[in-house]
Image (cartoon, grey):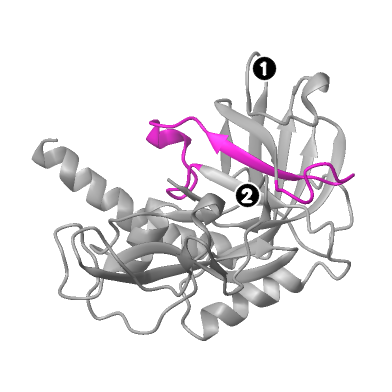
């Protein structure tokens, strides 16, 4: 990567970080997908856009009771024809109202929304108040826990109103860069539901050892969690580990050495590394 490319990457990073704050400060958005094939309204696997399919996003007011309100004076804030849709979630994967992941075409800076390449639209199907996650994200932020930013969005596909959704920031490398700067290297973990059930944060003792949150690597170094995020487990936002670091001095990978405390780690079979 040449110097000009490095400078552009740095500029894009700072603009994206600032833009995300402004983006999630807004009360509500309208996400409208048009010309989407009718046979893919409940996709279990990602379906890429083709033909005339188009995605547009704009601001709307929470008091506007129209299912698909038109763009306001600011107009359409983001539009792309290179994206994919898939239903997401474990316990709500077959619910009448399903969650969605929208991925923009990777590698194209023009098809990123304030630096983001993915939108997470949570259905809040198990939350009659539609406030639990919003309150959890707010409280975690106020006490200084690195956490996803959040707002709300209406979703419509073609002329069908899909409902109100919780729009949540994706936890990825850019999230780690925003919160930990140069200390963004290392493993990023996600708890999931598998053949033996869903991962939880309960303390486990099994034949393969004790999940205490501190372990010894094959080189003899003690390790512990450093980066944490929230995730819906059993329908509730919970705190979980996203990265590991050495508990000594910082390493070449950017690990933080001054971390204190520990968070219980889950069984290896219930973790995925990205």
The image's mark for residue 120 is 2
Q: Position of residue 59 (x, y in %)?
A: 67, 54
Q: State the residue at coordinates (77%, 43%).
A: 93
Q: Is residue 121 or residue 187 the one in the foreground? A: 187
Span shown in magenta? 89-117
Q: Nearer the viewer, mark 2 or mark 1?
A: 2
Picture quarter with the C terminus: top left
Picture quarter with the N terminus: top left
Q: Which secondary structure type mostly characterizes the magenta part of the structure?
A: loop
Q: Is residue 84 or residue 250 the one in the foreground? A: 250
Mark 1 lies on a secondary structure that is loop
- Say whether residue 98 is magenta: yes
Label 1: how many Cα within 10 Å (few below 14, some 14–19, many 20+)? few
Query: Can I make out residue 72 in this image?
Result: no
Mark 2 lies on a secondary structure that is strand
Q: Position of residue 82 (x, y in %)?
A: 55, 26
């Amino acid at each position: 990567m040449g110097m000009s490319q490095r400078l552009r990457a740095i500029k894009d990073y700072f603009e994206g970080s600032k833009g995300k704050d402004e983006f999630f400060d807004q009360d509500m958005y309208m996400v409208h997908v048009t010309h989407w094939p009718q046979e893919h309204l409940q996709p279990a696997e990602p379906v890429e856009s083709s033909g005339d399919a188009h995605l547009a996003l704009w601001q709307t007011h929470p008091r506007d009771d129209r299912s698909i309100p038109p763009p306001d004076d600011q107009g359409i804030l983001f539009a792309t024809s290179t994206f994919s849709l898939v239903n997401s979630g474990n316990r709500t994967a077959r619910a009448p109202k399903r969650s969605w992941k929208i991925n923009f075409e990777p590698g194209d800076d023009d098809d990123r929304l304030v630096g983001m390449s993915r939108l997470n639209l949570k259905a809040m199907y198990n939350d009659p108040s539609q406030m639990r996650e919003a309150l959890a994200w707010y409280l975690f932020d106020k006490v200084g826990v690195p956490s996803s930013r959040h707002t709300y969005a209406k979703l419509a596909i073609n002329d069908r109103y899909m409902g109100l959704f919780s729009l949540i920031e994706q936890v990825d490398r850019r999230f780690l860069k925003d919160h930990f700067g140069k200390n963004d290297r290392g493993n990023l973990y996600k708890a999931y539901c598998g053949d033996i059930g869903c991962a939880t944060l309960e303390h486990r003792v099994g034949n393969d050892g004790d999940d205490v949150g501190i372990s010894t690597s094959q080189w003899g170094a003690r390790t512990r969690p450093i980066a944490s995020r929230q995730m819906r487990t059993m329908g509730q936002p919970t705190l979980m580990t996203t990265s590991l670091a050495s508990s000594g001095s910082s390493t070449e990978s950017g690990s933080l050495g001054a971390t204190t405390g520990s968070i219980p780690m889950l069984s290896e079979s219930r973790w995925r590394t990205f």
